[in-house]
């Protein structure tokens, strides 16, 4: 089965333009920020400031992007008597090996007053429901629209995901942008007193999969519908998924292109690590997680860019199968049920059913596929730790870095124009700084006007002031 265009992962598509009422949004963000400030001062558990919280983590796509969606309900004891329940749904879209792509805060007013009815994410449920109902519907719709799967996650695991991402950003000298992004990130710098939310994921020991066919079906599960190299190979060949049949030239050129770049080398083992962790959430699929970790082992014995690392990835059956997923496997046609109401996740279900049936009928992979590797051999000295990826456990002497300390190093630097990147004005003078929020700079008044009218700073500046 061929998958045509590959859509990007989720909250990148949920921009500030979808949130039309900054006054309402700002009031909730302010309340959240005040609770976080109080938490910083008192150092009490998360539940003293947010009476309820829920979290869901998605599988990642072929770009290594995944989403963390949370519900935080402000503790009514911190509100004035008679104040209605205040809560927010937040999203953090991250890359498993890189930075935070985007964040979002949606207040309860936006859902309960029908402000977001026109947004596809919530139109099926309508106004007047509880925030838990909106949260469930929101997660389901993000799952359907991104073709990734979501699972319930403890707060401690989500905190680790965010903190690890901040540490990667620190290493790569990347920054957090805007009050909203910083506020969302700070929500994951607290400690929970609830047993479930204190749990960390314990990965199983790596174990080889029974055979390549088993790994092929794992890679075609609905939550891994976009767990392939379509973005990279589209850039290389200028074609979409399923348009051409793979041959040896396509196969070798694909491997060469993916492995010539250290950024992509770093991404693959990080994707497998995230997938293994994801399979241990809400159900603990130890068997699947152990297979993925086994295939990952040879990739992390040496640093990224090392010849042995490149050879290990070139001979990885996982990477070879991911490349083949992009091409037409010449499987023929089978009459399969479709799930149009579930959008891309429904396509993933159909895709999985198709390849499961095809394998049961033929007993083999799609006939056009070129797979030269087999299940990885065991390696000496390998571990299940996230070697090769920056995490809270393997930097700065093995001690988890304070989220607040890390964030201070990621605040936006007013050293370049927000529109053109210039570090000085055309006349050589210092940059102009926005007098309202003092968080962005410009080389000239004209660029400040452009950013205000068309660049989104009008909305962001309002959020920065309210936060």
Image (tube, grey):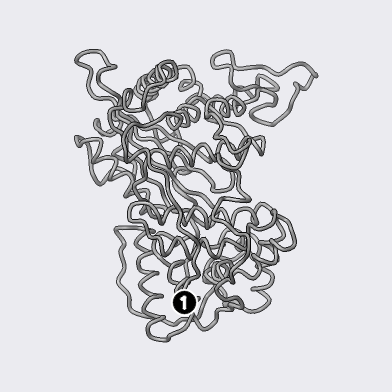
Residue 135 x %, y %: 29, 40
Residue 77 x %, y %: 25, 18
Dot 1 alpha-carbon crowd within 10 angstroms: few under 14, some 14 to 19, many 20 or more? some
Residue 46 x %, y %: 36, 27
The structure residue drawn at horizontal position 47% and vertical position 83%, both measured from the top left corner, is 364
Q: Quadrant of residue 235?
A: bottom right
Q: How many marks?
A: 1
Up/down of 364 relative to 284, above or below: below
Which quadrant would the N terminus be assigned to in this image?
bottom left
The structure residue drawn at horizontal position 46% and vertical position 30%, both measured from the top left corner, is 189
The structure residue drawn at horizontal position 58% and vertical position 77%, both measured from the top left corner, is 371
Residue 123 x %, y %: 28, 44
Dot 1 corresponds to which residue? 213
Return the residue nearer the eye: 90 or 243. Answer: 90
Question: Left or right: where does residue 199 sit relative to residue 108?
Answer: right
Up/down of 47 relative to 77, above or below: below
Which quadrant would the C terminus be assigned to in this image?
top left
Return the residue nearer the eye: 355 or 1. Answer: 355
Up/down of 336 relative to 432, above or below: below
Question: Left or right: where does residue 367 sit relative to residue 236?
Answer: left
The structure residue drawn at horizontal position 66% and vertical position 58%, both measured from the top left corner, is 301
Return the residue nearer the eye: 35 or 298. Answer: 298
| Residue at the limit of the structure toward the right, as seen here | 428
Question: Left or right: where does residue 57 sit relative to residue 240?
Answer: left
| Residue at the limit of the structure toward the front, as seen here | 381
Q: Quadrant of residue 427?
A: top right
- Helix, strand or loop for disc 1: helix
């Amino acid at each position: 089965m061929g998958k045509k265009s590959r859509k990007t992962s989720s909250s990148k598509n949920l921009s500030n333009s979808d949130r039309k009422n900054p006054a309402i949004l700002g009031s909730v963000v302010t309340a959240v920020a005040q609770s976080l400030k109080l938490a910083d001062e008192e150092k009490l558990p998360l539940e003293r400031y947010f009476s309820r919280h829920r979290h869901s983590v998605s599988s990642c796509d072929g770009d290594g992007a995944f989403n963390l969606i949370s519900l935080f309900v402000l503790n009514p004891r911190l509100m004035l008597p008679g104040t209605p329940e205040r809560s927010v749904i937040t999203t953090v879209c991250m890359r498993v090996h890189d930075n935070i792509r985007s964040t979002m805060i949606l207040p309860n007013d936006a859902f309960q007053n029908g402000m977001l009815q026109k947004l596809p994410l919530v139109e099926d449920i309508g106004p007047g429901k509880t925030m838990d109902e909106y949260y469930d519907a929101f997660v389901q719709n993000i799952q359907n629209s991104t073709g990734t799967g979501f699972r319930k996650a403890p707060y401690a695991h989500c905190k680790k995901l965010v903190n690890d991402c901040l540490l990667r950003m620190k290493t790569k000298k990347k920054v957090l942008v805007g009050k909203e992004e910083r506020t969302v990130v700070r929500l994951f710098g607290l400690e929970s007193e609830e047993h479930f939310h204190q749990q960390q994921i314990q990965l199983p020991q790596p174990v080889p999969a029974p055979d390549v066919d088993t790994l092929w079906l794992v890679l075609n599960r609905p939550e891994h519908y976009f767990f392939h190299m379509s973005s990279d190979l589209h850039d290389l060949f200028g074609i979409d998924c399923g348009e051409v049949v793979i041959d040896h030239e396509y196969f070798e050129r694909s491997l060469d292109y993916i492995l010539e770049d250290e950024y992509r080398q770093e991404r693959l083992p990080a994707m497998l690590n995230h997938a293994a962790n994801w399979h241990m959430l809400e159900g603990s699929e130890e068997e699947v997680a152990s297979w993925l970790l086994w295939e990952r082992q040879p990739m992390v014995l040496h640093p990224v860019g090392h010849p042995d690392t490149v050879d290990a990835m070139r001979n990885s059956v996982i990477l070879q199968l991911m490349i083949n997923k992009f091409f037409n496997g010449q499987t023929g046609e089978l009459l399969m049920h479709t799930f149009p109401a579930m959008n891309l996740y429904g396509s993933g279900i159909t895709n999985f059913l198709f390849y499961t049936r095809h394998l049961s009928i033929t007993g083999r992979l799609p006939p056009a596929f070129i797979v030269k590797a087999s299940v990885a051999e065991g390696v000496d000295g390998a571990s299940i730790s996230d070697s090769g990826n920056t995490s809270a456990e393997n930097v700065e002497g093995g001690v988890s870095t304070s989220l607040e300390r890390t964030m201070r190093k990621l605040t936006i630097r007013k050293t370049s124009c927000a529109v053109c990147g210039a570090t000085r004005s055309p006349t050589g003078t210092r940059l102009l700084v926005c007098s309202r929020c003092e968080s962005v700079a410009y080389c000239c008044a004209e660029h400040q006007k452009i950013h205000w009218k068309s660049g989104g700073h009008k909305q962001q500046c309002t959020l920065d002031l309210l936060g």
